Image (cartoon, rainbow, N blue to C red):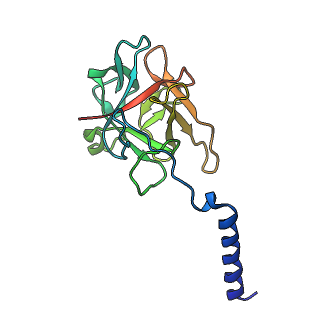
Amino acid sequence: MEITEFLGFSFLLFALAATSFPEAVHAKDAAAVLDVFGNEVQAGARYLIVAPSTDNTTTLAVTATSKIICNSDVILSTLNESLPITFSPAIKSNDGVIREGSYLNVNFDAPSCRMGGVTTMWMIESEGLIVTTGGVDRLNRFKTTKYEGDNSFYQLSFCPMSEPFCECSCVPVGVNSDKHLAPNVDPLHVMFEPDA
């Protein structure tokens, strides 16, 4: 088979696939994750992760166990103790919008840690199975999806990657009895508030 015949045949196959399965060629982007004001959550922008208390009387927020954020566990505390986070897509994207169901890296926004060469990327600590800082890009992925019971809330999940070609199921993240964020506990329903 000559190269021109091969190219012609390849084009015909693509054209056939495009007309038979248009959703494969023109797939729509997943819905954008929205902040509390209904605006699209932007990659790299600062947000607070907020959640209602169990009795719905106060607003709680994600923070660190230590003022030295660089090596801390991630906990749920009062709103006035909250720390800003940033999202970045684990798979490069050109639109800068965080999308539902896409793999994310989550970081505390702590410039002093970055200057010291320490990562504030969230990960799951293997011994205590809690969310902590010190993650490595691509191995510590999270995703956010709409919470099934109430469309104004989102669910954060941890999506481990054990080997380069093996993806494990995502596990919802909640809060354990010590107020630490952790997988495999009652899911935490969150919203994202821009950090002023």
Assign the C terminus to one quadrant of the image.
Answer: top left
Front-most of 162 and 192?
192
Along the horizontal axis of the image, is 29 left or right of 112? right
Along the horizontal axis of the image, is 79 left or right of 20? left
Front-most of 143 and 123?
143
Question: Can you give x and y, in whole percent of width and height, for residue 138 in the image?
Answer: 50, 47
Query: Which residue corresponds to the image point at 32% horizontal and 36% vertical from the top-left?
Result: 47
Dividing the picture into quadrants, the one containing residue 16 is bottom right
Q: How many marks on residues? A: 0
Question: Can you give x and y, in whole percent of width and height, for residue 96 in the image?
Answer: 38, 52
Which residue is most to the right? Answer: 1
Above or below residue 27? Residue 119 is above
Query: Which residue corresponds to the image point at 62% horizontal and 57% vertical from the top-left?
Result: 23
Question: Can you give x and y, in whole percent of width and height, for residue 84 in the image?
Answer: 30, 34
Along the horizontal axis of the image, is 174 left or right of 36? right
Which residue is most to the left? Answer: 196
Front-most of 85 and 147?
147
Query: Which residue corresponds to the image point at 55% horizontal and 28% vertical from the top-left?
Result: 148
Front-most of 49 and 83?
49
Above or below residue 16? Residue 184 is above
Assign the N terminus to one quadrant of the image.
Answer: bottom right
Question: Can you give x and y, in whole percent of width and height, for residue 125 in the image?
Answer: 49, 30
Above or below residue 122? Residue 9 is below
